[in-house]
Image (cartoon, rainbow, N blue to C red):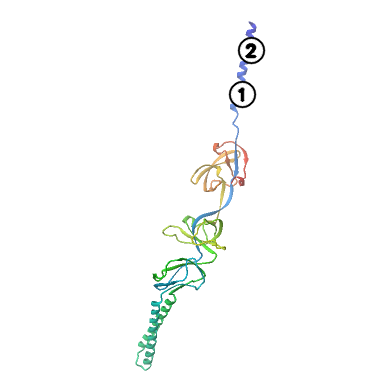
């Protein structure tokens, strides 16, 4: 009986000791702080950002003009076709000359008549028969007849169309035996120089960043894989009233004559405007709403949430214009479970070059 009481007493003492040890262990575990979280960070990088503007446009020759007749008439002959290369001074078309030639003949007759009238009036004035006014009127009539003859000869000379310089017939806009008015375009004519012009339109926000002399890279769907270099040679100072856009001319060097008028080109203009911006990986963004966003930075082992203003988002990075300083450590891994003030154990410090 005494043995049973002794065993019972020892059993309860051992059970009490076990419970005490378990309780102390649980209390000590609860008292320990959670281990620091592990994240990856990079340094915010300061860059000189050069804005690039994308635009599309139609290619044309460096000089294109519409050729027409000075006087109305019926086209008698066209000696070229579309795509024909011609030399300066080559006759391209001529109208029927009967009417123009008759005008020249009439002007010649009037001029000769005025000459005779002046000669007769001078003789009469010398004999005091004609007055000074009559002599002056005769001189005026001769001068008017001379001007009329000069105008008729000018019209006769431009009753044909000649090439103003070495070039190519881009388009024929009329045919033989058609009646055309003065100034009606007959040909679209272009120079054959190696310079070509890409005409693009920019918005009011973009035109201010572009300056004459800015460089551009241009590609054409018709010439896959080939990249051409160009530069801005002219930009409009007034918007088109219909599209509210500004015209910009980009000159392209086509030394191998691979480009043709009418090609559609894609231009990437590198503007001369450079501004300092801070760049971070796109993985660093915590929240974003338009241009407003937030990121987590690491300062002395603690997490801090910062509001930033986005300038632009690129393929793998974000350009920041406000809210972040260069060389601040930005958290890029583990962003999803962080909070303001969290203690951090930095697992890895990644370089900008390997992350952006």
For label 1, the SS is helix
Q: Residue at label 1?
A: 25
Verify CB contact (< 8 Å) between mark 1 and mark 2.
no
For label 2, the SS is helix
Q: Is residue 312 above or below residue 227?
A: above
Q: Position of residue 151 (x, y in %)?
A: 41, 78
> Badge 1, how many Cα within 10 Å: few under 14, some, many 20+?
few
Q: Toward the viewer: 174 or 24?
A: 174
Q: Looking at the image, can residue 26 be seen?
A: yes
Q: Quadrant of residue 185?
A: bottom left
Q: Residue at label 2?
A: 10
Q: Is residue 203 above or below residue 339?
A: below
Quarter of the picture containing the N terminus is: top right
Disc number for residue 49: none
Q: Position of residue 352 (x, y in %)?
A: 61, 46
- First in sequence: mark 1 vs mark 2: 2
Q: Position of residue 333 (x, y in %)?
A: 58, 40
Q: Toward the viewer: 208 or 122?
A: 122
Q: Toward the viewer: 170 or 5?
A: 170
């Amino acid at each position: 009986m005494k043995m049973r009481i002794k065993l019972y007493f020892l059993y309860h003492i051992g059970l009490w000791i076990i419970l005490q040890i378990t309780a102390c262990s649980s209390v000590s575990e609860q008292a320990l702080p959670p281990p620091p979280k592990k994240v990856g960070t990079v340094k915010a990088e300061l860059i000189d950002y050069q804005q690039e503007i994308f635009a599309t446009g139609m290619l044309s020759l460096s000089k294109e003009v519409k050729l027409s007749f000075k006087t109305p008439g019926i086209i008698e002959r066209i000696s070229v076709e579309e795509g024909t290369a011609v030399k300066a001074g080559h006759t391209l078309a001529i109208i029927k000359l009967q009417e123009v030639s008759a005008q020249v003949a009439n002007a010649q007759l009037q001029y000769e008549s005025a000459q005779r009238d002046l000669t007769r009036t001078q003789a009469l004035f010398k004999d005091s028969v004609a007055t000074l006014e009559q002599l002056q009127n005769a001189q005026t009539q001769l001068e008017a007849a001379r001007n009329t003859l000069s105008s008729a000869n000018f019209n006769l000379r431009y009753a044909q169309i000649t090439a103003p310089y070495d070039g190519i017939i881009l388009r024929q806009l009329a045919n033989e035996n058609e009646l055309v008015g003065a100034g009606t375009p007959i040909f679209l004519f272009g120079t054959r120089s190696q310079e070509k012009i890409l005409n693009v339109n920019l918005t009011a926000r973009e035109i201010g960043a572009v300056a004459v002399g800015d460089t551009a890279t241009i590609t054409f769907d018709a010439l896959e894989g080939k990249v051409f270099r160009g530069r801005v040679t002219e930009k409009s100072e007034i918007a088109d009233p219909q599209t509210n856009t500004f015209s910009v001319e980009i000159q392209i060097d086509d030394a191998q004559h691979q480009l043709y008028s009418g090609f559609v080109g894609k231009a990437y203009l590198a503007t001369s405007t450079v501004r300092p911006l801070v760049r971070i990986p796109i993985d660093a963004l915590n929240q974003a709403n338009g241009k407003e966003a937030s990121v987590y930075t690491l300062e002395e082992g603690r997490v801090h949430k910062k509001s930033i203003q986005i300038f632009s988002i690129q393929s793998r990075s974000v350009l920041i214009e406000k809210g972040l300083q260069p060389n601040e450590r930005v958290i890029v891994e583990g962003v999803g479970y962080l909070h303001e003030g969290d203690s951090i154990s930095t697992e890895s410090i990644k370089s900008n070059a390997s992350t952006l």
